[in-house]
Amino acid sequence: MVRDVEAIRGEIARRGFAVLDTTLGEFEILAGVLGGSVSVRHRGPAIDRLVPTDVAAAAPHSLSAVFGLGEFPFHTDAAHHSAPPRYLLLRLAEGSTTDTPTLIVDGRPSELSCADVKTLTRETWLVRGGGTRTFYAPILDTSRMMLRFDPGCMTEPTGTRLTGRQLLRDWLARSSVEEIRWVPGATLVADNWRVLHSRPALGPNDKSRALLRKLVV
Ligand SMILES: [Fe+2]
């Protein structure tokens, strides 16, 4: 059974994420307790089923459209939303198997120098929202202590020193990476404003890989 929700919130506040053992029903209940569900795309399903998708079959501006079955870069989810969801919940779909973990890094801004925070806050990237909607947003919004980074839907500014991407790369390189192994029941609950996630390239044993995702505002 899902642990006490306050204990889960406490663990997320401490380290940015929690790994639980849940049933599918508990996964849905937990999402409901943490907040309201939101679909990653307009009129999308309440639970996404994430399966290996090659470049040709991927949705526009998704990471699969750029990286296909290859390695995904570290990113936050739904970066194209004007207000990205606070929590990301992932679990292995029933009957699925995968050898490929999800990798996560706790991107606490407290690990950055003041100069780095200023750069990440001031440098605005072009974000492609749904349809033809675009807007500008920084990688780090200190008013909400929120990270927003997805190279699939965000383009760095031109005509500036272009330091945000490099800062983020350096920051990730010195951060410790946690591996989430997808065994049945394993459920990741991550603070999507603070934790970045990625995955290595998919292998031949990942043909039946399917992760269920819920996003919570
Ligand atoms: Fe993601």
Image (cartoon, grey):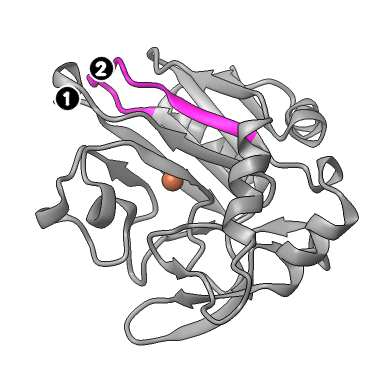
Q: Is residue 78 left or right of residue 161?
A: left
Q: Residues within 10 Å of mark 1 (few under 14, many from 20)?
A: some
Dominant SS of magenta comes to loop
Specify the quadrant that holds the N terminus. top right
Is disc 2 in contact with disc 1, using a CB cutoff of under 8 Å?
yes
Q: Is residue 138 left or right of residue 90?
A: right
Give the x, y percent position of residue 8. Answer: 73, 28
Q: Which residues are magenta?
A: 92-105
State which tag comes first along the sequence, 2 or 1. 2
**Residue sitting at the far right:** 114
Q: Is residue 148 left or right of residue 73?
A: right
Depth order, front residue of 43/181: 181
Question: Which residue matches tag 1?
Answer: 208
Q: Residues within 10 Å of mark 2 (few under 14, many from 20)?
A: some
Under mark 1, the amino acid is Ser
Residue under the image location 57 percent in, 57 percent down:
165
Q: Which mark is residue 97?
A: 2
Specify the quadrant that holds the C terminus. bottom right
Depth order, front residue of 102/70: 70
In which quadrant of the rendered view does residue 20 lie? top right
> Is the residue 110 above or below the residue 143 in the image?
above
> Is the residue 92 above or below the residue 43 in the image?
above
> Is the residue 106 above or below the residue 187 in the image?
below
Give the x, y percent position of residue 133. Answer: 41, 86
Q: Which mark is residue 158?
A: none
Residue under the image location 11 percent in, 55 percent down:
57
Give the x, y percent position of residue 86. Answer: 64, 53
Depth order, front residue of 59/157: 157
Give the x, y percent position of residue 192. Answer: 61, 48
